[in-house]
Image (cartoon, rainbow, N blue to C red):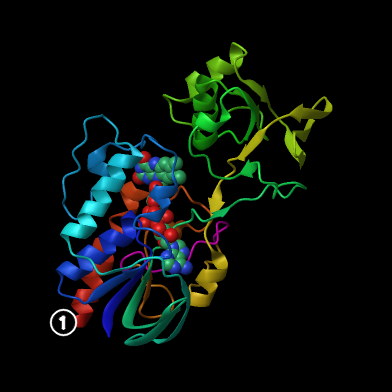
Amino acid sequence: MLDVLIIGAGPVGLACALETQRRGLKVAIVEKGALVNSLVGYPTNMEFFSTPELLEIGGYPFPTSHYKPLREDALDYYQRVARDEKLTLRLYERVLKLEGEQGNFTVTTDKGEIRTRNVVVATGFYDLPNPLNVPGEDLPHVSHYYKEPYQHVAQHVVVVGAKNSSAKAALQLTRAGATVTLIVRGPAISDSVKYWIRPDLVNRIAEGRITAHFNTCITAIHPEAVDVLTPDGPLTIPTNFVYALTGYHPDEALLGRLGVEPDPADEARAPLFDPATHETTRPGLFVAGTVCGGRATSRWFIENGRHHAQLIAAHLSAQAFA
Ligand SMILES: Cc1cc2nc3c(=O)[nH]c(=O)nc-3n(C[C@H](O)[C@H](O)[C@H](O)COP(=O)(O)OP(=O)(O)OC[C@H]3O[C@@H](n4cnc5c(N)ncnc54)[C@H](O)[C@@H]3O)c2cc1C
């Protein structure tokens, strides 16, 4: 019987595991994909917005040769921390449901059952994209995840969205030699785009290297074109590939099966939890990291979410050794 099972081996799940393990509790992490799976899925050579010390967990220094770490630096860092702390990892095992009560939970996965006294849900939000809900969205040349520009050189690419991910993708694709059309639902590039990225994109649009359509929605996707509705009427834009970078949301069905109750007063449907301990309304069930923000996926990130680990670990160890 474990003292704590952490669901999700992202940066915050790892922080929860090492903080609870260091306090003498018997801990394991169950992860449906690879170690730090979300970061594995981020774009190649993606530069973090945060400086390295703000991404550190467990007091391990995060040395990098650049001002901001790259995805590859962060993967090395978190995977080394997991190794050095000798965390017990059950990778490529998906959690399906939770039964029982604090002190005697049974977690059912696609590979079997795990018995544990407490459960921490650190499942993030990166698995479920916000859909465009238009015909053709499931065609093979449409993706909600941008990786790198090289397969799109000398091709037409439509990028949907006006936040950081779409801004960075549009710039990188353009510089690699793709012809980029940006489709933006609102009237401008979002003010939330980082201050060193936004002017770059605005200037590339102003000089005509990137075509941008504002106040515009995609209405259908075809194998070699997209239909959009602009303020001046409908338009068909030829394209070889579509990146719909319109954000992601947490797996609310899974949260429901685990017994995490959403806050009815919160528009983002964030889980109801005690901010001092991160315990939800189901005793023995905790939430940590980005999942704490519900659909407000930028409310908690690594910089601020990593601190949930100490709160949860302090509470659980006080309870275990009372
Ligand atoms: C492009 C990009 C750049 C970013 N840059 C920064 C930055 O500079 N600074 C910063 O602080 N934050 C940044 N963030 C946000 C940050 O990456 C996330 O907030 C962070 O990954 C959250 O960590 P987490 O551990 O809560 O969740 P995640 O890292 O998302 O981990 C959740 C894990 O749970 C697993 N999981 C989900 N469901 C199940 C299941 N049923 N069973 C088992 N496992 C499951 C997933 O596979 C995943 O590995 C960025 C995000 C993106 C997308």
User: Disc count in the image?
Assistant: 1
Residue drawn 61% across the image and 20% down it? 210
Task: Point out residue 20 in the picture as x, y percentages from the top left corner.
Answer: 22, 69
- The answer to which image quadrant residue 234 occupies is top right
Question: Which quadrant of the structure image shows residue 122?
Answer: bottom left
4 or 146: nearer the viewer: 146
Across and down, in percent, residue 195 comes to: 43, 26
Mark 1 lies within 8 Å of ligand 1 (Cβ measured): no
- Extreme residue toward the right, this view: 233
Quarter of the image where the C terminus is located: bottom left
Residue 128: give x, y in percent of width and height: 56, 56
Residue 237 in view in this figure? yes
Q: Per the image, is 274 magenta? A: yes
Asked if residue 18 is positioned above or below residue 198 in the image, the reply reads below
- What crowding class fits label 1: few (fewer than 14 Cα within 10 Å), some (14-19), or many (20 or more)? few
Label 1 sits on residue: 321
> SS of the residue at dot 1?
loop
Q: In the rendered image, is residue 292 in sight?
A: no
Eyeballing the image, is 66 above or below 18?
A: above
Q: Residue at x 33, y 61 (%)?
A: 13
Residue 223 lies in the magenta stretch: no
- The residue shown at (54%, 73%) is 256
> From what the image shows, is residue 313 above or below residue 174?
below
Per the picture, the main secondary structure of the magenta-coloured stretch is: loop
At horizontal 49% and vertical 53% (from top left) the residue drawn is 126
Picture coordinates of residue 108, whole percent (x, y): 45, 80
**Quarter of the picture holding the N terminus:** bottom left
Camera-side residue: 275 or 30? Answer: 30
Amino acid marked by disc 1: Phe
Q: Which residues are magenta?
A: 266-277
